[in-house]
Every structure is written in C-alpha cells, then in structure tokens.
Image (cartoon, rainbow, N blue to C red):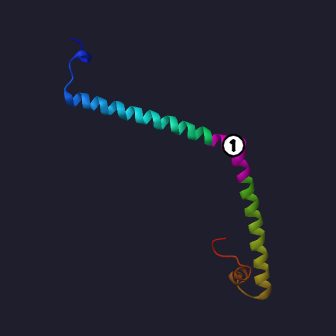
Amino acid sequence: MDSSEEPKSYKDQQRIAALRASIASLEAKHVQVEKDLASMNAKLIGNPDDTCKRYTQLLHEYNDIKDVGQGLMGLLAEARGVRQVEVEKEFGVSEED
C-alpha cells in the first residue's frame, strides 16, 4: 500500500487542512503583491536607471551650489571679522542645512 493511500489520523488531516489554507493565503498575498508591484512600476516616470542618474546629477549640482554659498559666507565673515556661524545664522542657515 502506498503511503499516500494510508488513512490519515485526525491530527494529520487538520495539519494538511491548515497547510492548504496557509498556501491559499500566501498565494493570494503573492497575487496582491504582484498587482502592487505592477501599479508602482506604472507610476515610475521613465527608466529607473535614468531616474537615478538624474537625481545623482541634481545632488551634485546642489552640493556645488551649497559649496559656493558656504564659500561666500566665509568670505563675508572674514571681511566682517566674525565667525562664519554668525553669518550663517544671519542668513537663516542652520546646522542641518
């Protein structure tokens, strides 16, 4: 007699039923995750690699502009004979900026 044909105990039947329910639940979640992923991909503008390159370029531009601004505040602080922090406070620049 094949082991799959042997009568199962009540506990085994419960375990099998619980596993089948769990599999069905996971399959439903998988379908939902796939739908969510498709929805997110549809919201992306253009190629993700191009988006990353663009943001990297913008970050470099921002950092260059910030460096120039800090340099100018440093020159202004030196000309006034005060610390750069005081000039930054005057222009509303905080430590987090």
Magenta part of the chain: 40-55
Indicate the position of residue 20 as horizontal and vertical percent values. 35, 30
Taking 3 as reference, is 52 above or below it?
below
Query: Which residue lies at the image location 79% right of the left edge and 79% below the top edge?
Result: 75
Q: Is 51 a magenta residue? A: yes
Asked whether, in this view, residue 20 is left or right of residue 47, the answer is left
Asked whether, in this view, residue 74 is left or right of residue 8, the answer is right
Taking 92 as reference, is 31 above or below it?
above
Of 66 and 51, nearer the camera is 51
Instruction: Locate the C terminus by quadrant.
Output: bottom right
Indicate the position of residue 95 as horizontal and vertical percent values. 64, 75
Majority secondary structure of magenta residues: helix
Question: How many numbered discs, if any?
Answer: 1
Which image quadrant for residue 19?
top left
Query: Which residue lies at the image location 41% right of the left edge and 36% below the top edge?
Result: 25
Instruction: Locate the N terminus by quadrant.
Output: top left
The amino acid type found where label 1 is placed reads Asp
Taking 72 as reference, is 18 above or below it?
above
Asked whether, in this view, residue 9 is left or right of residue 63, the answer is left
Of 4 and 70, nearer the camera is 4
Query: Which residue lies at the image location 64% right of the left edge and 40% below the top edge?
Result: 41
| Disc 1 element | helix
Q: Is 50 a magenta residue? A: yes
Which image quadrant for residue 76?
bottom right
Indicate the position of residue 39 as horizontal and vertical percent values. 62, 41
Q: Which residue is mark 1?
A: 49
Indicate the position of residue 59 as horizontal and vertical percent values. 71, 58
Taking 14 as reference, is 39 above or below it?
below
